[in-house]
Image: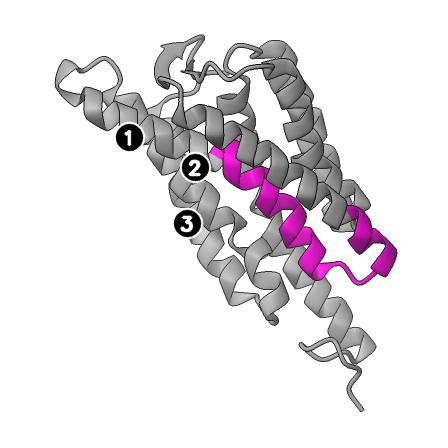
Amino acid sequence: MCFSAGASFTTSAVLATAGTATLGEVRSNRELLLAMFPIVFSIHQLIEGVLWLTIGRGQSQQLVQWLTVGYLVVAYCLWPVVSPAALYLIEPDAHKKKRLLSLLVLGAGASAYILYYMSRSHLEASIMQHSIYYDSDIPHPNELTALYALATLLPFFFSSYPPIQVIGVLNFIFCGIAFYVYHVTFHSVWCFFAAAFSINVYLFLRWLHRGQRQKGVGDDGTRQQ
């Protein structure tokens, strides 16, 4: 599979359209963070698309550095927090909310650790194996990757909603593919796959609201008379 600036820009455009439609499906403030996933991924892919075009151009090194920092902050620091937080907000089961809260704390700790070492490291991006390789020089990368995956993937399996669990299964499968096939450029490739799957948030919200209407539940979660 070949990744390129064109692939990133195309994915960004598709996600921007899907993200607009997803935000239109929001019926409660609790759903807003989850509904933002496609838009955030769209911006993320846009950043990487521009990075593809600027890597290797001597006059653009400062831009490359800023784009690299922006991409890694979203990839490394945002998702371990946003993923459990978004699912915590929509989770109706009290026991599962406690598990999600624990993962949120774990993700926040991992993000803080990564952000601290990112601020002390020289970050670089280069094209390798048809993808972009990000060199962040953060200590204990394998252990940190495991914590990162737990915080970003496990919340989907704790959800009470089957469509959310399906998204988690797909992400887990392609996380494995990205890790074993594209190990060196794992984060770039996995973010690309995860971005594509974020379109499913739109389908989930439509499914959720259709079920609520059938049960006579209002947008605020209360049963209508």
Q: Closer to the N terminus: mark 1 or mark 2?
A: 2
Magenta highlight: main SS: helix
**Distance of label 1 from label 2 (alpha carbons):** 21 Å
Colour approach in the figure: one colour
State the SS at label 1. Answer: helix
| Residue type at numbered disc 2 | Thr
Left or right of 71? Residue 222 is: right
Residue shown at 71% from the left, 32% from the top: 150
Residue 213 x, y percent position in the rendering: 74, 76
Left or right of 148? Residue 42 is: left
Q: Are marks 3 and 1 in contact (CB under 8 Å)?
A: no
Above or below — where is 97 with respect to 124?
below
Packing grade of label 1 (10 A; few <14, some 14-19, many >=20) is some
Q: Which mark is residue 11?
A: 2
Above or below — where is 37 with respect to 177?
below
| Residue type at numbered disc 1 | Trp
Numbered-mark total: 3
Q: Is residue 91 visible?
A: yes
Q: Which residues are magenta?
A: 75-99
Above or below — where is 144 with respect to 219?
above
Residue shown at 56% from the left, 66% from the top: 25
**Distance of label 3 from label 2 (alpha carbons):** 9 Å
Residue shown at 77% from the left, 78% from the top: 217
Question: Does residue 34 show up magenta in the picture?
Answer: no
Reading the image, the residue beneath label 3 is 16
- The answer to which quarter of the image holds residue 13 is top left
Reading the image, the residue beneath label 1 is 66
